[in-house]
Image (cartoon, rainbow, N blue to C red):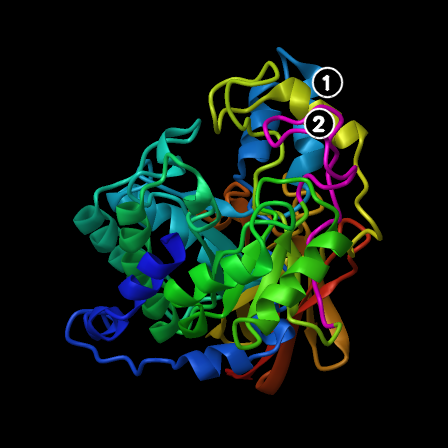
Amino acid sequence: MRTTTFFAAAMALAAVVGGVLQPGTAGTAVAATTAAEVRARSSAQLYGTGQYVSPTSEAAKSATALRTSDPAGAAAAAAIARWPVATWLGEWTTGTTLTKTITAATDGAAATGTTAVLVTYAIPDRDCGGYSAGGFDESSYDAWVDQVVRLVAGKRVAVIVEPDSLAMLGDPRCTAALGQQRARILAREVAAFTAAGVPAYLDGGNSNWVQPATMASRLEAAGVRSARGFFTNVANYYPTAREQVYAEQVSALTGGSHYVIDTSRNGTGWRGTWCNAPGAGLGTSPRVVTDGTGLDALLWVKTPGASDGTCNGGPAAGKWYSAYAQALVANAALGTPTPAAAPVGRIDQVVSSSTRRLTVRGWAFDRDATTTPVTVSITVGKSTLARFAASAPRSDVARAHGVGAAHGYAKTIAVPTGKRTVCVTATGLGAGGDTALGCRTVTVR
């Protein structure tokens, strides 16, 4: 009966998609991207060098907050903060807060060649009254999604759309009418993200929840063929290999949909409960996958260390659970480590400020040690003419990347008159190596 009502709702898709906004600034037309175009991209094209690491993640903030009161908890939070975790958006992120949150993530991703992973989590009657109950009403939700779409259009971002929204529909607390509403809402949402050129993934549950055929029918009704695909294992613990077998079955039933798997807490596999499961560990670290299957990436979607709810000693859902974070780190099975970070930065300006003088301005920092200024070298032709610390105030860098303001540079050097090629290199502080920030050609007066 539930599947039937889902397909009935899907019949209204043409009318829904017809109302999807075209992203862009006021008065500016933006060509819509088709689902075929979004689906045709490779995982490497979508994710670049991987998932974006936010310097202001919940783990990073908890590491700072617990430094004095809970040193062991702070150390565990800091260990988690080294890895990229998705940014969750809900009714707590609206208006200017929503704009700042998304802008910080997308600017950071653009600067590092990575992709920000966002999660929408505000659908009406979220969790059907469970530990994570909440959400907007339908009209407010649609307006909120439109704002998210405008902010991410054309950016380096992927969106995990409403965890549990489809898999939970077998729960008696979720009515048939709710199922119809979900199909309508989700179909509109993924069509909007696709039109904006953004890969979106719908809820595919996990390998132990809903049978592949049933899950596929729900995904079809919710517009999966207008999206990049679906996700599995979000906030759960099932082993990656098992999830991939399940996801390949669902993919085959949905026109070859791509998928991502959440490995944030599956290091020790299923632990007998989904809620703050005892004995769980961090799973395989996030990475792009190019194995010829439908798998795009292994991501950390659920925030490791954030409580699932008031169960097994945990605080309210979403609150930091220090003891649990410590256990996740102690039981971690991260797989082969991903490479250390190299510096990031930019040349803003190279100008001949006076006779036989050049001034070079820009910024640089290294995520391996964000509080330590990196050394910047200026080379003209084959000669290195200056080496100095990038430690000048840059409030814009602090706002965009959350790494503090002391990462700017502005250096004036003596250079002979004539046309000169000026190159800048940032020296790495960790194992990630150095970064060439680029070259500029300028005529020295």
| Residue closest to the eye, 71 or 32 | 32
Q: Name the side, left or right, on which 268 lies relative to 116.
A: right
267 displayed left or right of 31: right
Q: Residue at x 21, y 48 (%)?
A: 138
Is residue 374 one of those drawn in magenta?
no
The secondary structure type at the circle numbered 1 is helix
Q: Which of these two is toward me, 230 or 288? A: 230
Residue 206 horizontal/vertical position (percent): 60, 49
The amino acid at mark 1 is Ala
Q: Residue at x 38, y 67 (%)?
A: 223
Quick check: marks 2 and 1 in contact, CB under 8 Å? yes
Q: Which residues are magenta?
A: 264-290
Residue 96 at what x, y percent from top left? 27, 44
Residue 360 appears in the rendering: no
Label number found at residue 301: none
Q: In x, y percent, where is residue 359?
A: 53, 67
Residue type at mark 2 is Ala
The vertical placement of 382 against 25, above or below, is below
The circle on residue 72 is 1
Q: Nearer the viewer, residue 165 or 98?
A: 165
Write down the quadrant of residue 419 in the picture: bottom right
Q: Does the magenta stretch mainly form a helix, a strand or a loop? A: loop
- In the picture as drawn, the residue positioned furthest to the bottom comes out as 419
Circle 2 residue: 76
Number of marks = 2
- The quarter of the displayed image where residue 211 is located: bottom right
